[in-house]
Image (spheres, rainbow, N blue to C red):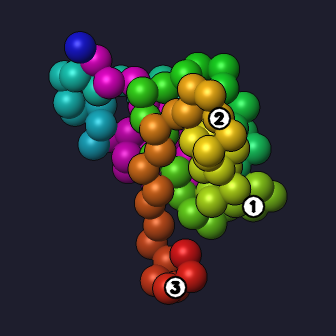
Amino acid sequence: MTIRVLLADDQEMVRAGFRLILDAADDIEVIGEAADGAGAVALGRELRPDVCLMDVRMPGVDGLEATRLLAGPDEADPVRVVVVTTVDLAED
């Protein structure tokens, strides 16, 4: 079984780092990348990944709102989301 992953982070180098690490695993495939929350929501709904690695802070639709839109209580078939951040703020 291959785990299909969507990467969502506004920093290209962070996405590249995650891709490098994940591509080294035989059972993980990065199926898409988004540079903002709106793109993550669109790709998440289109590609239906097994999991989305979602940055908290992104321009426009932030990662928290994108997570609600993909995995919130109103979603009949939610996408699994792992929220990641390098920001050290308690509210995030």
User: Is 35 positioned to the left or the right of 14 in the image?
Assistant: right
- The image quadrant where one finds the C terminus is bottom right
- Identify the secondary structure beneath mark 1: loop
Identity, as a three-letter code, of the amino acid under mark 1: Pro
Q: Residue at x 42, y 27 (%)?
A: 50
Callout 3: few (<14), some (14-19), or many (20+) C-alpha neighbours within 10 Å?
few
Position above or below: 20 against 56: above
Identity, as a three-letter code, of the amino acid under mark 2: Glu
Q: State whether residue 38 appears in this view.
A: yes
Residue that label 1 marks: 59
Marks 2 and 1, how far apart at CA: 23 Å
For marks 3 and 1, the one nearer the N-term is 1
Residue that label 3 marks: 89
The disc at residue 75 is: 2
Q: State whether residue 10 appears in this view.
A: no
Image-quadrant location for residue 3: top left
For marks 2 and 1, the one nearer the N-term is 1
- Identify the secondary structure beneath mark 2: loop
Is residue 90 or residue 29 the one in the foreground?
90
Image-quadrant location for residue 19: top left
Marks 3 and 1, how far apart at CA: 17 Å
Q: Residue 38's x, y, as percent?
A: 76, 44
Q: Residue at x 63, y 60 (%)?
A: 64
Report the magenta residues as a range: 2-20
Is residue 24 or residue 46 the one in the foreground?
46
